[in-house]
Structure formats: structure tokens, C-alpha cells
Amino acid sequence: MGRWLDRFGVKKLLYADGISFVVVCLLFGLLTTGYVSGALATTGWPVLLGYFMVIIDKMSTQMSFIRTVYLKNIAIDSSEVIPSLSLGMSMDHFVSITCAILSGLAWGLWGP
């Protein structure tokens, strides 16, 4: 990831981080819909595809360090970096929990 940061720069990798997040979520949704509808088998290559998606998701999560590098580059006072990162992580957690609850309600009402 560090080499990619040196090669492509922060701006391009921030875009890649956002796009990878959206793509991973869409693919997980399509995969789940395929399992539930019966279009995809729950054995064989579709399961391997699910495993592959988990690996891609973890790699996408690792790209979050790019935001840290960007924040360190634009911070006027370096003492503001840690509190800003802590607040950002708290907000991410709050949004994740809220989205999980809302998604669970939508799943229960309308299905996957």
C-alpha cells in the first residue's frame, strides 16, 4: 500500500478507497441476493466467490490508512491529528451501527 501511495498519490488512492467500498458492498448485496433467490448454489464456486469477497473487503479496509496520511499532510497543527482521527473513527462506528440496524429492518420487511 505504501508503494501504491508513492506511485499514485493520496488523491487517486482516496478515490480508489471510496470506489472499492461501493463496489464491495454492491457485490456482497448481489452475492447475497443470488444465494437467497437460489440463482447461486450454496456450494462450490459461489462459496469461493464469497470467500474472495471477504478478502477484497479486508484489503479495502486496509486502505483507510490513506485518510490518516492525508490528514497528517493537511493538518495545520499536528496536535489536532489524533483527536480528529478519534472523532472520525467514532463517527464511522456510529454510522456503521445505525446502517446495520436500518438494513436489518429493511431486510426483515422486504427481504434481501
Image (cartoon, helix red, strand yellow):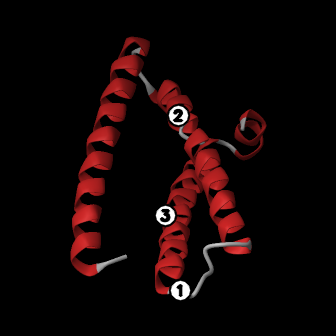
Q: Earlier in the sequence, mark 1 or mark 2?
A: 1
Q: Earlier in the sequence, mark 1 or mark 3?
A: 3
- Name the residue nearer the viewer: 26 or 88: 26
Callout 1–callout 2 Cβ contact below 8 Å: no
| Residue 108 on image: x %, y % | 24, 71
Callout 2–callout 3 Cβ contact below 8 Å: no
Give neighbour class at mark 1: few <14, some 14-19, many 20+ (Cα, 10 Å): few
Q: Which corner quadrant holds the C terminus?
A: bottom left
- Name the residue nearer the viewer: 2 or 97: 97
Can you identify the residue that label 2 sits on?
70
- At 28% across and 47% down in the image, what residue appears? 97
Q: Is residue 99 left or right of residue 50?
A: left
Can you identify the residue that label 1 sits on?
38
Type of residue at label 2?
Tyr
Residue 25 image label: 3
- At 26% across and 41% down in the image, what residue appears? 94
Give neighbour class at mark 3: few <14, some 14-19, many 20+ (Cα, 10 Å): few
| Residue 1 on image: x %, y % | 72, 38
Mark 1 to mark 3 CA distance (whole Å): 20 Å
Quarter of the image for residue 20 reads: bottom right
Q: Secondary structure at mark 2?
A: helix
Residue 28 image label: none
| Residue 103 on image: x %, y % | 29, 64
Q: Earlier in the sequence, mark 2 or mark 3?
A: 3
| Residue 72 on image: x %, y % | 50, 24
Type of residue at label 3?
Cys
Q: Secondary structure at mark 1?
A: loop
Callout 1–callout 3 Cβ contact below 8 Å: no
Q: Is residue 111 above or below residue 2?
A: below
Q: Farthest residue toward the front?
A: 43
- At 32% across and 39% down in the image, what residue appears? 93
